[in-house]
Amino acid sequence: MTTKADVLIIGGGAIGLSAAYYLLKSGRSVTVLDRDAIGQGSSAGNAGHIVPSHIVPLAAPGVIPTAIKWMLDPPRSPFGLKISLSPAYISWLIRFMAACSEENVTRAIPPFKALGLLSAKNFADLIAEEKFSCSYQETGLLFLYKTESAFAGGRHEAELLHQHDMPAEILDREAIHKREPAALADIIGGVDFTGDSSLHPGEFLRLLKERVREMGADLRENTPVTKIEASSGKITRVVCPSEEFEPTLVVLAAGAWSPQVGRDLGLNIPIQPARGYSLTMPATKIMPRGALLLGERKVAVTPMGEKLRFTGRLEIGEMSTTPDLRWIINIERAVREYIHLDDELAISETWAGLRPTTPDGMPILGKSPRHDNLILATGHAMLGLSLGPGTGQVVAELANGIQPEFDLKAFGAERF
């Protein structure tokens, strides 16, 4: 069976659902395809942090030596690297190492800042307009530090944000304990990125999924794309196991699966999966007041109403979504080094998800350089949720011939 479609979105995570929402608001008809359940993939189990403060890409100076140091202490390392001889994987690693430069950071900051601020504003507007109940808090993101060397790095990051007119507050020992009573006594200081916020990502995506369905979206779950046909610079057919689609426009938002989905398009989509973990439990006796990031251990802590979630680890090249119990245990141990926790935690959910990561640490966002009717919206790494509503607005603008308010060149697929 062949179905005509106006806008066909491949991928039903934070990016795909956000794109669907803004496209529907603009008057377009939308069909969303996902290989699994819509709104329940990698975006649903993450930390739920909305971080316009995150203006520095993953590929930055100092990342390589820090990663090597971490890997020499495997039980405590927040970073892992798959051993593989795959040419695509080796090419990605070489490109990543080359991108860990000041030049890459300088190029990334303006578009990252613009997209992050747009997305944070859109989150606030969308949640208020749609009356979503998803534990949304505009309480900042508080980094906690136990060592002077790590605290110095936090102060440096705060100063960088100040240079770019972004808010960050440096807190000494007394101020940090006044701000966060759950912190243990040996926390020596912190930085509060006061423009950040947090929510329950699974609840947000569940509500967004239902809203776009109410707005008229055709949601097709458990519908993997097996082939994409193109002719004369235009996608003509998208093939699924039991149905084919003839779209006017295609949005590729398939996250870590984007290279596989787009393999027929002749595009260079250098994305590697970066696996992360989370564990969720009922509220503890002493709940953090807001979202936290544990500086030295790179673990996120997020209160979500009557729940508490810990999120951590970055494993480049791991495609599996099966949680590794060792890292679930290590993440809990890390949190116990920073904040008060109950002696026994009633863990109700464990999760492993894949962040789609480009070699330069920046999303791929914009029109396809080879197809008139394809928009790419993928490669957001750990920021897929955080940048979702901003990316969704940009996709809708591009789809309707509207020039976004900031230059997308740094996000273009042509850079690869």
Image (cartoon, rainbow, N blue to C red):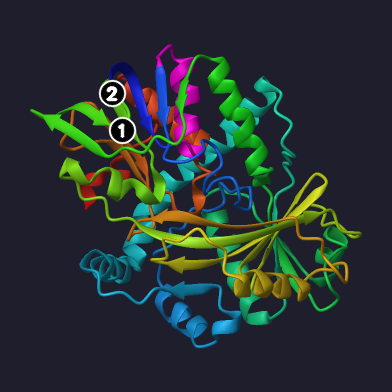
Residue 110 has which mark? Answer: none
Among all residues in the image, which is located at the extreme top? Answer: 27
Q: Which residue is mark 1?
A: 240
Disc 1 is placed on an element classified as loop
Residue contact at pointers 1 and 2, CB within 8 angstroms: yes
**Picture quarter containing residue 243?**
top left
Task: Name the residue: 32% across, 62% down.
Answer: 103
Q: Quadrant of residue 244?
A: top left
Give the answer, above or below, for where 198 lies relative to 38: below
Give coordinates of residue 361: x percent, y percent: 39, 57
Which residue is at the front of the view, 81 or 368?
A: 81
Does 224 sit above or below residue 274? Answer: above
What residue range appears in magenta? 12-29
Under mark 1, the amino acid is Cys
Does residue 148 lie above or below 401 as drawn?
Answer: below
Does the stretch in magenta take in 74?
no
Mark 2 lies on residue? 245
Q: Earlier in the sequence, mark 1 or mark 2?
A: 1
Density class for disc 2 (Cα within 10 Å; few <14, some 14-19, many ≥20) is some
Residue 411's spot in the image, x, y percent?
A: 32, 45
Residue 335 horizontal/vertical position (percent): 73, 70
Is residue 26 found inside the magenta-colored segment of the image? yes
Q: Nearer the viewer, mark 1 or mark 2?
A: 1
